[in-house]
Amino acid sequence: MDHLEGLNGPILYEDKPLRDFSLVFWLKLNPGEGGIVVSFDPTQWFEIEVLRSGNSSGHLVLTTVNSLGVIDRMESNELVANGQWRSITVTYNTSQSEQSIQIDQLDKQSKPTQSGLIGGRKTRSGYLGVSTFTAEFSDLQEVKGNFKGAITGLRFIRGQADSKQLKAIINPGNRPAFSLRQVAAPRFWQPKEPAVAIVGDDATSSDSFQTEDHYPHDLLRCTYIQGLSTDALLGNDKPASLKVIQSLRKTLDHIQQSKPDSFGYFEADGTSWNPLFAEWEVALYPLAISHLHNGKSSQYDPEFIYQGYQLPRESNELELMPEQCPLAQTASFLGGRSLISPNASAAMNVRLDEFINAHKGIVPKEFLDIQKNYLQQKRKC
């Protein structure tokens, strides 16, 4: 698509015949005005003109010349020079043997094209107005030369263009509100980190991370502690003295007793709950595909995915085939044990060391398998 951008420059087309092309523009002419709107030399390519005299004054004329030098002429039935802005769409389509003129996107006037392609015997420079290659052209600006009137929004489209595309050029309001853009699809085959929601009365937060809920809509209230230094608690890789700890404890006890609801204070009286792993069990109701799944175990046929699901061309996710929708009545129960955090493995090793050392290597019978696997793992490390 070529267009004049408001500078003093012509339209230049390559040295090859035109098979299909369209011109779309807005035109405003008073009675008696007109002239050559755009030209690629009527003796070589094509030209669009609004006649200024004679019985056809004010009508639009398309003149074309094929590669054999045969001239063809098509004139609009409707008057365009009426003092108003008119949208003009001129189309020449040798592929469908049709040329047309459409004014204000109303009824299209058509006639057959002549045989052969348009022009092509030499490189042509298109221009606005007669015999000038420096026609000043911008929105709502009058074009110089022998043409008298105003042109704006000129678009020269090489190749075929459908009616929707041409309407969108004439009237931006016809352009779609959304456009499709091809982007890389998510890697649906890559696993994601699992997330588990724990619900029920026993689902409480760890004591290690207490929260202040006395003032949910206010800032946390603080108490100024005077005459107490905590620098000794930081201390040079040595434990703080008992005297310092007792002094701090006494101060904190005093704060809690005096204002129990004004300070985010929690006194731990034992080992806090810090789980290492979670035991889980899931009831899976598989698809009722008798030849792919027996409904009583977690064993699937190797062809389960291929025969039960499909991957549409426009999708990046597997979709269940319509005939495979019903679910089996018998559930398959799957269970296991999972470490909750990366640090759980190290913490578990410490606890197992303490447990085995406490029993001096002679652990209860029910823990023999755990001891054996643990010792094998330690040897690998």
Image (cartoon, rainbow, N blue to C red):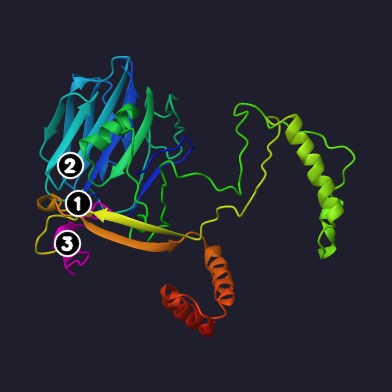
The answer to whether residue 201 is left or right of residue 299 is right
Residue linked to disc 2: 71
The answer to whether residue 305 is left or right of residue 153 is left
Secondary element at tag 3: loop
Q: Position of residue 371 (x, y in %)?
A: 47, 78
User: Residue shown at 17%/51% (left/top)?
Assistant: 68
Q: Position of residue 139 (x, y in %)?
A: 44, 27
Q: Quadrant of residue 52?
A: top left
Whether 140 is drawn above or below 268: the answer is above
Tell me how many marks there are. 3
Tag 2–tag 3 contact (CB < 8 Å): no
Secondary element at tag 2: strand
Residue linked to disc 1: 67
Residue 121 visible within the image: no
Disc ID at residue 296: 3
Asked if residue 376 is among those painted magenta in the image, a careful observer would answer no
Seen from the viewer's position, the closer of residues 319 and 354 is: 354
User: Residue shown at 13%/64% (left/top)?
Assistant: 292
User: Residue shown at 54%/72% (left/top)?
Assistant: 352
Query: Which callout, 3 or 1, points at the residue further toward the start of the chain?
Result: 1
Disc ID at residue 56: none
Distance in Å between CA atoms under marks 3 and 1: 78 Å
